[in-house]
Image (cartoon, grey):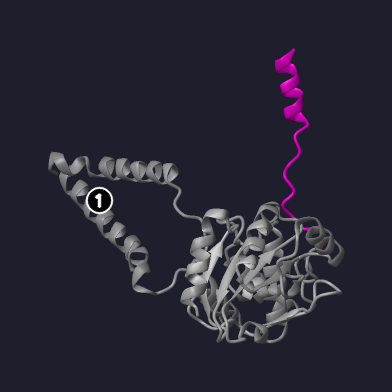
Amino acid sequence: MSRALRFVPLAVLLLLIAGLIWRLANPGDSVIRSKLEGRPVPAFALPAALPTKAGLTSADLATGRPRLVNFFASWCGPCITEVKVLQELKRRGVAIDGIAVRDRSEDVTDFLARRGDPYARIGSDLQSRVQIALGSSGVPESFVVDGKGMIRYQHVGPIKDSDVPLILAKLEQAR
Amino acid sequence: MRRLAILLLLCAAQPALADSSLPPAYWADRQLPDPRQEAKAAALMEELRCLVCQGQSIADSDAELAGDMRDLVRRRIAAGEQPAKVRAWLIQRYGSWISYRPTAEPVAWPLWLLPLALLIAGAFLAMKRVRVRR
């Protein structure tokens, strides 16, 4: 047996350790993207989250103009800061619909009374079923849907002030 | 004194609230009445990845979304759907990432070939050693 061959197992082991250390230092992207970008919104019908506002169905999303669908919840911290940005988008003429995930009507009412209400319609998704059907994995998350009801863009995490131009551009592309 | 105060404050720190106040979905932590269906659902839930605690299966995870996914799996199995179809439905939405069962796609070929390659390499090494001893 040649001398060099003797060190092959050691080299393999070192390579493995180096790989593990590298992955520990760079854990990679843990964001899960929906595979439904470019595909139609799956059919759904959600009851109203508020007594004063209509619920949301997939048919409401194919109205001939692009819309922003926002998954939110009163129990979600980042959603508090996001509402302000959504208000700004609404002021700029963006049509926004909400889907309240695992939320009570009174809690949604209280949340919107305190933070402002940018939504045209709000559906109540008590068991995250529509959230799963759209390939979303948390709150807040937003989808740009075009006039024909096709999903054109998914935004994971809160829409920040700095994301406004991006969202407006995606809405413009969906026109 | 200040250190002690900080230490006490740390002990009193509350975890951030990141869960809803709603109870778990009906079938999240409840077995299906038909044991055969429950067995099918349980086997599938072991092989589906939790979206929140990535690395855990939805059977193991305590995350609310995992509970809602268990509810979805049990409902569909109870309605007579085949586990493979439920898995395909989820893969369509989240990619093959969501399933722990390796697929036969080209990207997974090294995974299937590696054990074979290691076995051959091991046999080769062992043979060489035995020959040298003689």
- Report if residue A138 is visible in the image: no
Amino acid of disc 1: Ala
| Quadrant assignment, res A97 | bottom right
- The residue under the point 83% across, 64% down is A109
Stretch of the chain drawn in magenta? B1-23
Residue B29 in magenta?
A: no
- Report if residue A173 is visible in the image: yes
* Residue nearer the viewer, A97 or A103: A97
Task: Give the left or right position of residue A87, taking residue A145 as reference.
Answer: right
Residue A51 percent coordinates (x, y): 86, 74
Residue A63 percent coordinates (x, y): 62, 86
Residue B11 in magenta?
A: yes
Classify B132 as above or below B74.
Answer: above
* Residue nearer the viewer, B43 or A109: A109
Which residue is identified by label 1? B126
Residue B17 percent coordinates (x, y): 75, 48
User: Which chain is mark 1 on?
Assistant: B
Q: Quadrant of the N terminus of chain A?
A: top left
Density class for disc 1 (Cα within 10 Å; few <14, some 14-19, many ≥20) is: few
| Quadrant assignment, res A148 | bottom right
- The residue under the point 87% across, 63% down is A106
| Quadrant assignment, res A12 | top left
Residue B91 percent coordinates (x, y): 52, 74
Task: Give the left or right position of residue B74, taking residue A172 as reference.
Answer: right
Secondary structure found at label 1 = helix
